[in-house]
Amino acid sequence: MTLPMTRRLLAPLAAALVLGGAAGCVDLKETPITGITAAYYNTPSGFDAAVNAAYTPLRSHWALERGATMTVFGTDEYQKGADGSYKFFNDYTSQLTGDVDFIRNTWTDFYLGINTANIVIDAAKTANVPDATKNLRVAEAKFLRALYFFTLVRTYGDIPLPLTPTAGVVTNTTREPVAKVYDAIIADLKAAEGVLPDKAAQYGRADKPAAQQLLGEVYLTRAGAAATSPDFALAAAELNAVATNPRFSLVPNYASLWTMGNEVNSEVIWAIQYTSDPLTNGGDNFGNKLHLYFGYPYDLEPGMLRDIANDRPFRRFRPTKWLLGLWDRTIDSRYEAMHKVVWISNNPNNIPKVGGVPKFAVGDTAVYFPGLPTIPAAMRAATRYKLYGEDEYQDAIFPVLNKYLDPTRTSTNQEPGQRDHPMMRLANTYLMLAEAYARDGRPDLALPWFNKVRERAAKPGQQAAMDVTVADLTMPAGLDFILDERARELTGETTRWFDLTRTGKLVDRVVKYNPGGAPNIKPFHVLRPIPNSEILLSTGGMKQNPGY
Amino acid sequence: MKRRLITVSLLSACALVLPASRATAQQSGTGRITGVITNVESNQPMQGVRVTLLGTQQTVTSNPLGHYTLTGIAAGQHRIRASAIGYTPVIIDSIPVREGQSVTADIAMRHQTVELEKIVVTGYGSLAKRDVTGAIGQVQADAIKQIPTTNAIEAIKGRVAGVDIVSSGNKPGDPVRVRVRGQRSLKASNDPLYVLDGIPMAGGIGDLNPGDIESIEVLKDASATAIYGSRGANGVVLVTSKRGQAGNTRTSYDTYVGAQDITRRVEVFGPQGYADYKREAYRTAGLYKCGTPAVVSQSVCPEGDAVTFYAEELAALKNSTFTDWQDLISRRGSQVSHQLAVTGGNERNQFAVSGNLLKQIGVALGQDYDRKQMRVNYEGQATSRFRVGGSALVVRSLQRLGRSDGLYGEALADTPLSVPYDSAGGIVFKPTPDAQRDNPLSDVNNWKNDSLRTRLFGTLFGQVNILPGLDYRVNFGPDITFSRNGVFVGAQTQSKQGAGTDENVRNRHTFDYTLDNLLTYKKQIGSAHKVDATLLYSIEKQTFEESFGASQNLPYESAQYYNLGAGAVVSGISSQIRQWALQSYMARLNYTLLDRYLLTLTSRIDGSSRLAEGNKYATFPSVALAYRVLDENANQKFGPLNNLKLRASYGTTGNTSVDPYQTQGSLTRTAYAFANVGAFGFQGGSLPNASLQWERTATWDGGADFGLLDGRLTGTVDYYRANTNDLLMDRQLPPSTGYSVITQNVGSTRNTGFEVALTAITLDGWHGVHWTNDFTFSHNKNEIVALNGGKVDDPGNLWFIGQPINNPNGGDNKVWYDYQFAGIWQTSEAAQAAQFGRKPGEIKIVDLNGDGKFSTADKKILGNTYPKWSGSFSSRVDYRGFDLSVQAITRRNFMIRNDNIRGATLAGRYNSPAENFWTPNNPSQTTPRPDKNTENPFFFESRGYEDGSFLRIRNITLGGQVPARYLSRVGAQSVRIYVTAQDPWLFTNASASVLDPESQTGQGIPAYRTFLVGGSFGF
């Protein structure tokens, strides 16, 4: 081999080796840049992030179809409307099983919240955060954990009770007795009550009155349908603290509670937070969607077109006949205050014509539900617009609950709304306080709180007429009277199913007032089935609730 | 270079063997056969063609002018056989040879698609097909070019047994789904690995112009794929691009232009049928009343119609102004392609450059695909021992889909009792007041979904010949993709219903590079041993970045998605980066003993950044043996068999099924607010699991390659069994833990299958007619063997032991688990129906557990979308420069879910497939009674399951060479003109409302057929 030949060979060989070797070493160590791991919780911002995350599951339930279906359907207040896939929650038919996604996801989402709260409580031991902040945030986490457990135990009965964050593969979950769950809930709420300030620094965070109100309701619920229980007095003490807290007062006008933009008012103790910003409102799957479900399809009516102001009507929840007859409308303002009964024509293209002349114009009334049992012929003859009597109500024709209408959505079919969902409202505090006193054998103490709620609801000059007497609140008949009042005041406010189960009145009232559920409901329906996925995946020997 | 090396060694091997075994057969005489061998396509003389005087061992090779001469032949009738790699062997019978005289026999050779002696690319090298020990399918340029598709991989549909290719949709530029021997993974991708000219293609091969492809090889068994180790389990698709050849510079221009129209449409209710259906829905709800006093009526009356129909619908009924919305949004599509290529070079340097323009106008309004591409390929001999080369591919494509599949869904749902245009010819946005519907023409104008991709794919290599037989090679291949997806939904759309806008932009940038260091050694040791060894050190690294922004309510719609900042509301913003790296060592030894016994040993060690410390490295070994029982080249025979090779292989491969960072666990971002102040947080997202490993698949394969009747009938059969273990599954946790899953290596799946590929040269020059037929047959049985709980079903994920995989990712194959339809409750069964809480006219399902209730316990496995078998047939006839070819594909015995039927709400609100629905007077057993008050019929889930078996005529092409005497005038060397019908017919049992049984739900944009005319011009 000559020298030039060698060079001709070696130079490219060397070049190739250099090229091959230069990039020939690759680092297989992996460092996440976009993502973050659990170590983050020990930093101040990470600790805060865990606390914020513990609040998020609040949005997964009550103000979505799931929470509404599980609290509004299958009660005395509402029966099934024309549309929707979850009618069996109203009808208590065999389709209501542990495989239903609402059953599964309620469990999953609240246990996610519980685990997040557990993370906060656990991370507080090591996080690099000032003690004062830690204590405050741990108290918030305990409040949330209690709320999630409380919702689960009321829905499912015996439930797993994890109080530390999950690490690694955990499969041996077991159902703990209801009593033990309540002990944990009460311990959490007492701890929270002792630490939380009277008013949270940021609106929407848990504070002391919220913990007191929740604890009051927990006691009331733990007492159940019992005729006597020490829990009634305990409940009354907690609720009285809220009722007498100077921060809160009933707003003078019941209707103004539901005015868009007035969600923050003197009557709200604590509310799930929503915003107009899609980023902080959680995207398309979240937001307050309750505006969808109580609607009747006005957009099929002559002279009407779906628009933002009139909302998007899903026709899921139809008021029962019993509910519609509940108010004495001569003295009680609430039926009118909470129902939308008039629709103003917004579509010139389909206004009916008589002899070529439109019967009415855009801006005139197109549909009216006067709330009469039947429409007199003379009235019908004298009206140019459409009238519905109560005898004409159907699965897709009924007056619409206006508590959740949200005209601030930016397009007709937009689902996420921005109303805060009031979980705790002073009128409810009064009614629960009255119930606690009344069931504790002290109806005289109950009466003023009860009448405050009724008087506020009175039509002008009818305050006295709205007042009730100690006899009305005396047990045992007084319990039904109180439940009726709760229906009048808290209609559709996602509490009804729990009100009826805790007082042992669910079966009785569904049989009486809900035609869909009446033929099928059985005593076991006071609990929901637990998710079959939990039973299947658990190695702890879980059993389904009886009946399912 | 590599190909030539192998060819040379192959020839020399033959030369060594032949004299030894056949020295006795020489005969004596003085006659001669002589002639010229030409390539029938190019009319160019062919050098290096082997011509054998059959019955003797005399073989000669043609010279550069294509001349050959066989001498010393005894008088009589003789047969000769001409063969060359990549060409169909030609046998000429009855050549009369006289003593002392020369007889002329000119031979025309033709490129052959399936043939035993061709070169097969095996990954990190290539082999003569006869030396291959694994299961590898090959498709060459001619077959690829024949299918006028935008996606190169679709061109091999039905060409390789065991490779299942299914369209994922019929929109222009839609990707296809490719499965090699079934699927293995429950959670991770089941896509094969794509490799272009040795470099893995990070973004798939959808950007590649089919005209630039020389061949596609699909590696199927573990012995073939194990060289790709951790990524080989789903099969490997090797794409080899065209490159320059030494010789005259050749210029070619290929073009076609075609028209496309819809093959099937869904027959929805026409105007009268729709009116009857809507009336019935209102009757059922007690709303259709006639007379005074008004009673629910079966007759038709104006009062009833007034309640039932919108004013617009009443006007349409009165004036007979109806609309076929399906027709309105369909159009005749088109597809045009132009490709210009120049290839050439000399002994030292070769080049190939090409450019391609392709445009497809879809059959649905507003959908099209446009691609522009350039490619340069250069290889040069820098010194006698140093070779360098490189290639660059630049592609830019724009896919515009508008409202995508939803456009067709809108057209199917809209009432025919309405008009699309107003009296001034403008588009009526809302043909009826229904709040969910609009005019799909308005969506065409106001709904944009544009994907723009720019891709740069390059390769560089340097190769040094260190010692005879020993080469060192470096490959470097960067693959850079920018893509931008812009979506704009204007106010006048179904989504926005007249108010607001939605707009978003997603930008993605992927940079991937591969660096290979390869050492290869080839050596013939004595006459008995041949060694071909490869050593590889390789790294691959990928960085992926993505950013996304979304806003709402633009003040002016002309900004579309180009000015997100103008939107009144920011509705989404995100970005991410993801990186991974792979470091690999691979060794492969091909050893041949006595040219009869073949052994391949491979082992690859992969180290991956995706796995946790301590688990980063894994080894994937394989072994394959082959025994050449009968050798065609040695003229061995057994009855009609003249070629037989038996193969057996075993090996393990892996699946890259862990996402980067997955082993470390992650937190998930949450949103909340206090008052109106955002309170974002992080909750536990996924639990960390540092013990994660690759999924491993161990494959047994036994196969045979055979030839009969002097190569007139050749074929391959393979049987395999692939067991995948350590499946990476999301092991579900009891939800009360706060987590739904943890990713673990648990469970296993199995694929067992049988493949046959046959090629028959039915006529070989009979009166000048060449006729070849190809068949493929594939059967694959996929089953889940174990899940995380052992042999326990998981109905939540639709995973059942013994049933095929239901992979929730990417709309993959599905197992159907649902209620079993049992007809419609009839009036006479009212009492029985009532026990189940149902009424006559509603759907009856099978009460599987007999508990007298309908509940989720009554669901069962109804079927799945996996075909029992699939096959293809293609046939080609050549006669005097004309060619006619036909290809058909079939998939048999699988179940689809017809979502047009299943999703029919029958509530009188939306139009629906024209079904014979139940009424009190019409005891239908197929379709429930329409009911305005039922949003979906009870147990609607049970409807729509049906057999999807189909036979599709894939392609018919008739082509002709323009005779040489006309060519000189236009300066061309060869011109071929052809007409093609692509997918002209579909034969299926699927019902009329299934748009395309190839899709699993029968929905989307309909399938179309293409009629085109094209030309190939060589200069």
Image: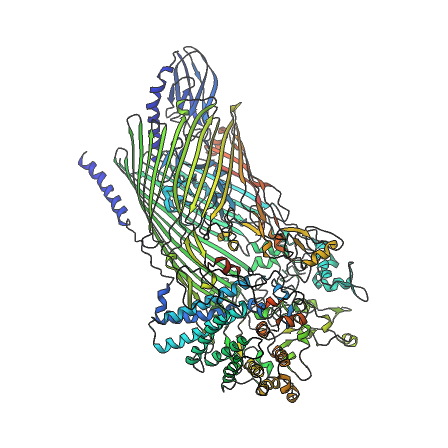
- Rendering coords of residue B333 (x, y %): 57, 47
> B290 or B918, which is in the foreground?
B918
Name the image quarter holding residue A255: bottom right
Question: Most extreme residue toward the top, as rendered?
Answer: B99
> B355 or A179, which is in the foreground?
A179
For image coordinates 67% across by 75% down, the residue present is: A324
* Total numbered badges shown on the rendered structure: 0
- Rendering coords of residue B862 (x, y %): 58, 48
- Is residue B5 shown above or below B371? above
Q: Is residue A33 left or right of residue B741?
A: left
- Is residue B29 shown above or below A407? above
- Rendering coords of residue A177 (x, y %): 49, 68
Residue A292 visible in the current orientation = yes
Residue A341 visible in the current orientation = no
- Colour scheme in the image? rainbow
> B116 or A133, which is in the foreground?
A133
Question: Most extreme residue toward the left, as rendered?
Answer: A3
